[in-house]
Image: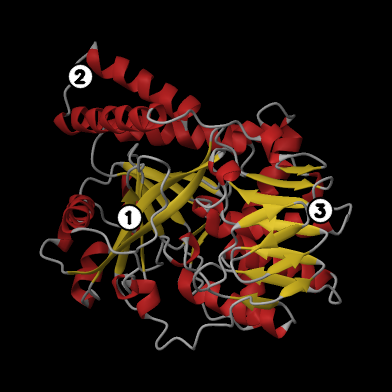
Amino acid sequence: MHNDTLCNFWTSTLGERPPARPRLTAHLQADVAIVGAGFTGLWTAYYLKRLSPALNIVVLEAERVGHGASGRNGGWVVGNLAGLERHIGGLSLDERRLCCGVVADNVDELGGVLAREGIDADFHKGGAIYAAARYRDQVAIQRGYLQHLHDLGHRETDCCWLDAGQLAEKARFRDGYGGIYHRQVATVNPARLVTGLAECVERLGVTIHEHSRAEILERRKVSTGEGSVEAPTIVCATEGYADGFHDFKRHVLPVQSLVVATEPLSESVWQEIGMAERPAFSDASRLINYGHRTADGRIVFGARGSYRLGARSKADQAIGEAAMRMRRDLLVDLLPALEGVRITHGWGGSLGLSRNFRPHAILDRRHGLATAGGYAGEGVAASHLFGRTLADMILERDTELARMPWAFADASHRQLIKRWEIEPLRWLAAQAITFSYAGEEALMRRGKPLPLIKPALQRMNDYFASVIE
């Protein structure tokens, strides 16, 4: 694979990387073996080692630390979980509020760890704006989403409505009709976070082997081409990069998300845009976009990409000119003050989407296999929460996290996560959904009622969002 890491803005901030860690070339015994040196694997290792310092933990990484989604994402640390309603929808209001409180407070927990461990990842808690900023129809969409958050159990002090004037005080979009302000959201430089976390767990005594691709996962043993690790517990922390493991690949699907970074913006442009508090921002598009102001005054902005036939993860990082142009045009549509801005970086990766669209932390004690994932693009915060959860479950700690509805002990991922359909059915479905979402976007852009077509398309896309995703 060619070296294309310089297209990733986050990676460009790291400076010269040290030599790769040693490959696994021996047959080892450990207490826990972890496959994947991304956020899920490293947070699991961190909490296991903090809670039980004597544990012998070995982490295997196919490429370099943070090669997958952990080093490529948009940098949001979200105090929510995509698909949370599927876990807690049937609980009482008090129980839902407890779960939502755990998820929301996870943002501050993550920030606290970075401060204590001295990991400089540009963590900044500026909240997030979910705006109705391009079409009037987005106002109803965002108000509906705010009601959903409150019904789910999120605190009203954390999630509130901004009218047009209040929105303009935080950010000045093209047509800022209003939007949601979610207080429990932060942003980070994910490459600095994942590399700093790897160095932290190594200081604690965890062993990391890079360029050590796991080829076989069996009961209490993981093997590479040159060595193996036997352990009572194997953690599969590959999420959207499970290509090599056919069984996991059938349950968690890789979907592309593509990101660009602008050049540093002048102070006069920032005066026009606002965003003095550096909030994350998004608008009510089915195609999902997300952005924020970086520590050095750029905007990093991304949007959901496509599904690749055969459930192929994105191994390289570079994206094409058309993908970069589409994201630049969408960004300028939101923030016209950026007309003429130069895009300096464009990159992408794969997020993991489970068939029943709910994130999971699973420990199969019988087979000694644990896994977590299905984050649906919100993995920066979720991986921290689920790494903590897996650590408690593996150590058999009776904690609040181990009792959460996303934690499954003594069960198999085969039992809990529905399989995706065979190809080419899932690829065809993905194409149909993408075109349908784009159609709804086009109708909103026209701003005309279209009393028959528009409501029908919206109902169909609501169905897609709730059932297919």
For label 1, count other residues whose C-alpha is less than 10 Å away and answer few (under 14), some (14-19) or many (20+).
Answer: many
Residue at 54%, 43% (x, y): give it. Answer: 249
Using residue 341 as the reference point, say whether residue 167 is left or right of it: right
Of the numbered discs 3 and 2, the one sitting upstream in the chain is 3
- Residue 404 horizontal side relative to residue 297, left or right: right
Query: Mark 3, mark 2: which one is toward the viewer?
Result: 3
Q: Secondary structure at mark 1?
A: strand
Look at the numbered disc 2 and give the secondary structure of its residue: loop
Q: Amino acid at mark 2?
A: Pro
Q: Secondary structure at mark 3?
A: helix
**Residue located 21% across and 50% down the image:** 330
Q: Residue at x 46, y 73 (%)?
A: 191
- The residue that disc 1 covers is 258
Give the percent coordinates (x, y) of residue 202.
Answer: 68, 81
Local packing at callout 2 (Cα closer than 10 Å; few below 14, some 14-19, many 20+) is few
User: x and y percent of residue 143 in the render?
Assistant: 42, 34
- How many numbered marks are there? 3
Instruction: Give the residue type at disc 1.
Output: Leu
Q: Position of residue 440 (x, y in %)?
A: 26, 28
- Per the image, the residue denoted by label 3 is 393
The reply to whether residue 113 is visible in this rendering is yes
At horizontal 59% and vertical 67% (from top left) the residue drawn is: 225
Where does label 2 land, which residue?
449
What is the distance, in whole Å, between disc 1 and disc 3 at their CAs?
A: 34 Å
Report whether 416 appears left or right of 268: right
Depth check: give the residue in front, 53 or 57. 57
Say what amino acid the circle numbered 3 marks: Met
Q: Give the distance between the C-alpha atoms of the residues marked 1 and 2, in whole angstroms.
A: 32 Å
Point out the residue furthest to the top here. Answer: 452
Sequence-wise first label, 1 or 3: 1
